[in-house]
């Protein structure tokens, strides 16, 4: 590889304009691809297979028109007075204009919605009054019916008494006839008996007629009672419906579209597509309509679903970071032209990498943070990798190496190390795909692409530019001293053992103390409250929280799967019973039905929690709702399965998925770190110490992030005005990126120590030799990294700021504390043991020669020897007094 890069460097230097024009053509193609094929960037995240994703998909399948993105628009009067009729009319016209945009499914007019709610409340009140009047009429009719029934019952009793008398008279007559016949006197009294019988028959006929009349009256009463019962049943059914409607209205009382003082209103723009599928053109069209609103005395703000996702991609903070990096380069290189070279190379690389990646945003779901990560990494590693090669080339020129030979050697040695270092960053970023989280895998892939391009530019464009600069890569004073003996290496003196022990203890204890807050880490996606205070998203979020309650910034979607279909007439009471159950849960302030499936076995509700989507109480509510499923209510036979979706639910699921993935990813990265360093340094102690140091710096970075962004420490300094959970994918991203960068610094420092040791220096002298040769360029590289990443701490995008801070502070800890203090101290204390490797392992691992030592020997390039004094007496048995300091190659 070193020989190939040597030849590539010489070719690029000789064909400088061909290489430069080639990269400019590639840049043009990347930009053209972005302009032609670039799609939308999403400001929210989703993970297939989570509970939230399942419920969201189920909602889209069961209830039509519920899956599209919804943007919130906040209208507020400037004087704090209620909206006038003219202002309300203009707001309605504005929303109607937005509704005409292609891709907008509909809008919600806050004043129409408020009026509809008032009408609904009035209808319910009127219905209750009508029911009360109807009930009163029924009660009066029932009383009259009861009185008539009592009269009929009295007449029936009289008829029954007459029948009893008739029966008694008939019995007496029959007895008298029998007695007369027994006495033989029947014939004399026969006429009398017949007359009495005729009288009884006439009485019976009269009784029968009376009974028939009473039966007819009873039938009329029965018919009237049936009618009253039917009316009562209808009134009871209507009362149940009205009661259910009233309960639903009461449950949703806190969901308002117009504030109590009438000075703030919430409108909604409902899009046809989901957040990820929503095109940038549709969002921009909606934003343009709202930005163009000219309603006298009314301000208009809107949420992140409408705000353009690339806003704040490059801002003042990022530019300042690059300027600081430029200052570092000028101070280190002491010349303007060579200082500009890394910046130009990095900017071309960023342009190719980011524009090329965005060209695929039309076919790949890509978040708004993804290109920002590419910009951060492309700038940082692009500047650093170019700097490593330039620095090597400058040092070689100073000792008198020929121009083109020096360019080739710099490319074959430092360029070889750049390729290897970049490969570690590539592997770490591409390994994000093993987490099984699509958006994280895309971020890692885009970041890896930007790093790959930075490596390619470093080993091709950098030699080309060096070829054009010729000796102007050095300042005038440096050019006058080429080959001067002043460039010889100074004598090497190892550090004191007591100093090494003190450094070891201080660095470990210090990093552990800084890492303590990491034990309290909470993960989540930041709400719009974390955005810059002058953004429309922030204004929208805070206004809704102040005027309508924090919970309305992140309502939950709760679905209920019923055991069987519910008839249409019974759906409202069932919804009311479910709303009552939901309202009984802690920290729920409002519940509103969203819809019912066509077959009536699936219902959806909007549940407004007490606090915002990132609060601990809302997180607890989501868990409680899920844990309570299945539930039972009186109006439904069987168990009802509940599901939860929404912003807070999605944050919880994504955070949990990321928390589960982090240990696996960390294990892979740490294992990879050990294997790589065993191969590179042919040692067991160095990889273990280096990996342990990486873990220390990583968790110290996490601790600092928690202290600033979750606890709010030094909030005004870093623009943290609303502390909240840590960005949920930040730990995974920072782990991958920091691992790659830590390997860079480890490589450029410790490989120099190993090479000095291999060339004859004692182990402890080699530590100082490697540190001396590499610390200047690593210091500059780390400062550049911190400057570039630190610039993003003040980004306009809320999700970018913690990423920039974590990477900046992580690089600061790893480069200056772990690599320059902890590692040298440990290697001094371990002595020759640092380079011990079992013989069987030494035989099987390949010799990668990262620094290109073989190339140096082949081309016979040497630097000025170190002072020929013998090293100090060894301070441990591991130090061999026979090893004399020998010349080391220029670094």
Image (tube, grey):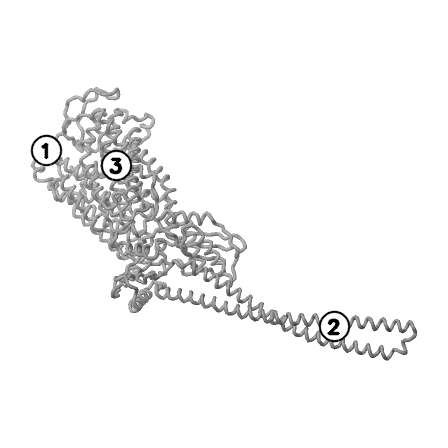
Residue 403 as seen in the image, left or right of residue 369? left
Q: Quadrant of residue 890?
A: top left
The alpha-carbon separation of the residues under discs 3 and 1 comes to 35 Å
Q: Given contact means CB atoms under 8 Å apart, are the residues at marks 3 and 1 in contact?
A: no
Q: Given contact means CB atoms under 8 Å apart, are the residues at marks 2 and 1 in contact?
A: no
Expressed as whole percent of the image width and height from the top left, the position of residue 757 reads 22, 27
Residue at 51% across / 54% down in the picture?
Answer: 633
Question: Which of 24/380 is in front?
Answer: 380
Q: Quadrant of the N terminus?
A: top left
Q: Residue beneath label 3, please?
A: 814
Q: Residue beneath label 2, please?
A: 162
The alpha-carbon separation of the residues under discs 2 and 1 comes to 148 Å
Q: SS class of the residue under badge 1? A: loop
Between tags 2 and 3, which lies in front?
A: 2
Give the residue furthest to the right.
184
Q: Which mark is residue 483?
A: 1
Residue at 13% across / 44% down in the picture?
Answer: 468
Q: SS class of the residue under badge 3? A: helix
């Amino acid at each position: 590889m070193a020989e190939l890069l040597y030849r590539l460097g010489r070719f690029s230097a000789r064909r400088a304009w061909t290489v430069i024009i080639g990269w400019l053509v590639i840049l043009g193609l990347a930009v053209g691809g972005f302009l032609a094929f670039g799609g939308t960037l999403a400001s929210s995240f989703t993970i297939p297979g989570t509970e939230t994703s399942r419920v969201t998909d189920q909602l889209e399948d069961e209830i039509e028109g519920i899956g599209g993105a919804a943007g919130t628009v906040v209208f507020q009067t400037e004087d704090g007075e209620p909206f006038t009729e003219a202002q309300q009319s203009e707001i309605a016209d504005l929303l109607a204009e937005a509704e005409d945009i292609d891709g907008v499914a509909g809008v919600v007019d806050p004043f129409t919605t408020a009026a509809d709610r008032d009408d609904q409340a009035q209808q319910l009140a009127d219905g209750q009054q009508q029911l009360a009047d109807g009930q009163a009429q029924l009660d009066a009719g029932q009383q009259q019916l009861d009185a008539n029934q009592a009269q009929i019952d009295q007449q029936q009793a009289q008829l029954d008494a007459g029948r009893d008398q008739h029966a008694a008279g008939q019995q007496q007559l029959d007895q008298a006839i029998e007695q007369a016949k027994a006495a033989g006197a029947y014939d004399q009294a026969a006429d009398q008996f017949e007359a009495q019988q005729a009288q009884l028959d006439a009485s019976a006929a009269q009784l029968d007629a009376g009974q028939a009349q009473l039966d007819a009256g009873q039938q009329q009463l029965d018919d009237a009672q049936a009618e009253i019962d039917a009316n009562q049943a209808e009134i009871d059914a209507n009362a149940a419906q009205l009661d259910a409607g009233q309960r639903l209205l009461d449950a949703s009382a806190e969901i308002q579209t117009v504030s109590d003082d009438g000075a703030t209103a919430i409108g909604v723009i409902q899009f046809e597509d989901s957040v990820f599928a929503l095109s940038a053109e549709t969002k921009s069209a909606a934003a343009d309509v709202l930005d163009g609103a000219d309603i006298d005395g009314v301000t208009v703000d809107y949420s992140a679903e409408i705000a353009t996702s690339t806003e704040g991609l490059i801002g003042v903070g990022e530019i300042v970071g690059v300027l600081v990096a430029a200052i570092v380069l000028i101070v280190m290189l002491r010349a303007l032209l060579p200082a500009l070279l890394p910046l130009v190379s990095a900017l071309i690389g960023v342009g190719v990498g980011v524009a090329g990646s965005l060209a695929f945003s039309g076919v790949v779901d890509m978040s708004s943070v993804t290109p920002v990560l590419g910009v951060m990494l492309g700038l940082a590693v692009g500047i650093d990798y170019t700097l490593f090669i330039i620095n090597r080339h400058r040092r070689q020129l100073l000792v008198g190496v020929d121009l083109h030979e020096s360019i080739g050697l710099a490319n074959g040695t430092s360029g070889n190390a750049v390729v290897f270092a970049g490969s570690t960053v590539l592997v770490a970023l591409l390994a994000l795909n093993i987490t099984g989280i699509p958006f994280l895998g895309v971020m890692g892939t885009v970041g890896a692409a930007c790093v790959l391009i930075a490596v390619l530019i470093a080993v091709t464009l950098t030699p080309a530019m060096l070829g054009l600069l010729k000796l102007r890569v050095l300042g005038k004073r440096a050019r006058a001293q080429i080959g001067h003996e002043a460039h010889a290496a100074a004598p090497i003196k190892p550090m004191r053992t007591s100093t090494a022990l003190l450094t070891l203890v201080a660095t470990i204890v210090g990093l552990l103390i800084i890492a303590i807050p990491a034990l309290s880490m909470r993960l989540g996606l930041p709400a719009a409250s974390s955005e810059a205070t002058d953004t429309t998203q922030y204004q929208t979020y805070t206004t809704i929280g102040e005027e309508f309650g924090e919970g309305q910034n992140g309502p939950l979607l709760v679905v209920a799967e019923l055991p069987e279909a519910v008839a249409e007439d019974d759906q409202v009471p069932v919804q009311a019973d479910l709303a009552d159950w939901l309202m009984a849960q802690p920290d729920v302030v409002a519940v509103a039905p969203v819809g019912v499936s066509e077959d009536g076995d699936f219902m959806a509700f909007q549940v407004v929690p007490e606090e915002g989507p990132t609060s601990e109480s809302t997180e607890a509510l989501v868990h409680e709702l899920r844990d309570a499923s299945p539930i039972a209510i009186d109006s439904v036979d069987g168990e009802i399965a509940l599901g939860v979706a929404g912003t807070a639910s999605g944050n919880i699921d994504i955070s949990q998925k990321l928390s589960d993935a982090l240990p696996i990813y960390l294990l892979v990265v740490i294992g990879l770190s050990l294997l790589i360093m065993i191969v590179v340094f042919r040692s067991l102690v160095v990889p273990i110490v280096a990996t342990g140091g990486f873990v220390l710096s990583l968790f110290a970075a996490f601790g600092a992030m928690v202290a600033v962004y979750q606890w709010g420490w030094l909030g005004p300094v870093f623009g943290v005005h609303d502390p909240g959970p840590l960005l949920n994918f930040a730990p995974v991203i920072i782990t991958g990126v920091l691992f790659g960068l830590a390997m860079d610094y480890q490589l450029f420092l410790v490989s120099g120590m190993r090479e000095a040791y291999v060339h004859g220096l004692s182990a402890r002298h080699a530590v100082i030799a490697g540190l001396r040769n590499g610390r200047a360029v690593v210091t500059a590289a780390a400062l550049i990294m911190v400057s570039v990443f630190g610039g993003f701490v003040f980004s306009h995008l809320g999700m970018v700021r913690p990423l920039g801070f974590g990477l900046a502070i992580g690089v600061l800890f790893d480069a200056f504390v772990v690599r320059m203090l902890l590692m040298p101290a440990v290697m001094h204390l371990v002595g020759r043991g640092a380079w011990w490797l079992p013989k069987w392992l030494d035989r099987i691992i390949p010799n990668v020669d990262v620094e290109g030592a073989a190339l140096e020997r082949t081309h016979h390039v040497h630097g000025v020897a170190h002072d020929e004094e013998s090293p100090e007496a060894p301070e441990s048995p591991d130090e061999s007094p026979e090893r004399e300091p020998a010349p080391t190659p220029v670094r």
